[in-house]
Image: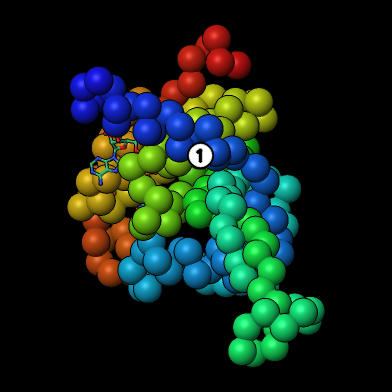
Amino acid sequence: MSLCVLAYLVTVMSMINFKVEKLRKDELKEIVELDRMCFDERIVFDRKIFQELLSNECCVNLAIRKKVETEDKSEGKLEDKSGYKKVKKTKDKLVAFAIGLVRDVKENDVNGKEGIVLTIDVHPEMRRLGLGSMLMNSLEKEFVSRGCKYSILTVQVNNHAAISLYEKLGYRTIQKIYKYYPTNEDAYLMLKVFDVKDN
Ligand SMILES: CC(C)(COP(=O)(O)OP(=O)(O)OC[C@H]1O[C@@H](n2cnc3c(N)ncnc32)[C@H](O)[C@@H]1OP(=O)(O)O)[C@@H](O)C(=O)NCCC(=O)NCCS
């Protein structure tokens, strides 16, 4: 078996374990922590902003979780020096999330709804497994089902990983916005118009 086939099989096998679900309000702490792992502290969203986005009906909040083993010390038979029995349990850990916003637009020659990708965060140890693509595909599906004609987003001009992901999914740069971020970095405004057959 060639290395390429093996790499492909490993990716497919790992994807089977992941599904896109709804992001929950009780995950706020994990969301804030993951966001801090993904972005410069000067551009991360504030905890309060996340709280508002999670309660906003116009938002599409998506999550991918991974089962991790935890060792729970519960009282029981003496099995180690501490006098506690170690019980193995699994819990869901948030490893990636995306938040989008559906907005009514009545400007210039646009009259309808647009989808805005507000953030997409994949845990550093979980990258290049297709999770970012899964989240973007689900976000776009939801945008389309809510009547959006297109999706837009902004990205730091030096964020090559994200730009590459977006281009692969069919986004194109329509504008460069100078000093867009609090860090004074420039941004690209990127757009993807949905096919009529998507609507
Ligand atoms: C950008 C990000 C969301 C990508 O998530 P991901 O799960 O690694 O993306 P995927 O595995 O679905 O990658 C899909 C494609 O994107 C491109 N890509 C992703 N990471 C890349 C990298 N580091 N370098 C080059 N291309 C990359 C590749 O074309 C990749 O396809 P391939 O793996 O078959 O070559 C992730 O790196 C991340 O969370 N970064 C920090 C937060 C961030 O920058 N968010 C975007 C803000 S606008």
| Quarter location, residue 48 | bottom right
Q: Say if disc 1 is inside 8 Å of ligand 1.
A: yes
In what quadrant of the picture does the N terminus appear? Answer: top left
Report the front residue among 169 and 93.
Answer: 93
- Look at 36% across and 73% down and name the residue there: 42
Residue projecting furthest to the top: 197
Which corner quadrant of the image does residue 47 belong to?
bottom right
x and y percentages locating residue 87 in the rendered image: 69, 69
Point out residue 19 in the picture as x, y percentages from the top left corner: 59, 38
- Residue at image x 24%, y 61%? 185
Residue drawn where x is 64% and y is 90% of the image: 82
Looking at the picture, how far across and down is residue 57, in whole percent?
73, 48
Element assignment for label 1: helix
Give the vertical position of 88 relative to 95 (above or below): below
Quadrant housing the C terminus: top right
Left or right of 32, for residue 1: left
Give coordinates of residue 95: x percent, y percent.
50, 54
Q: Extreme bottom residue here?
A: 82
Query: Left or right of 192: which side holds 175?
Result: left
The amino acid marked with disc number 1 is Leu
Density class for disc 1 (Cα within 10 Å; few <14, some 14-19, many ≥20) is: many
Residue nearest the observer in this picture, 114 or 45: 45
| 179 relative to 100 in the view: left or right | left
Residue corresponding to mark 1: 135
Image check: 153 left or right of 103?
A: left
Protein image colouring: rainbow
Residue 177 visible within the image: no
- For the question of whether residue 37 can be seen, the reply is yes
Name the quarter showing ligand 1: top left
Question: Exactly how many numbered labels are in the figure?
Answer: 1
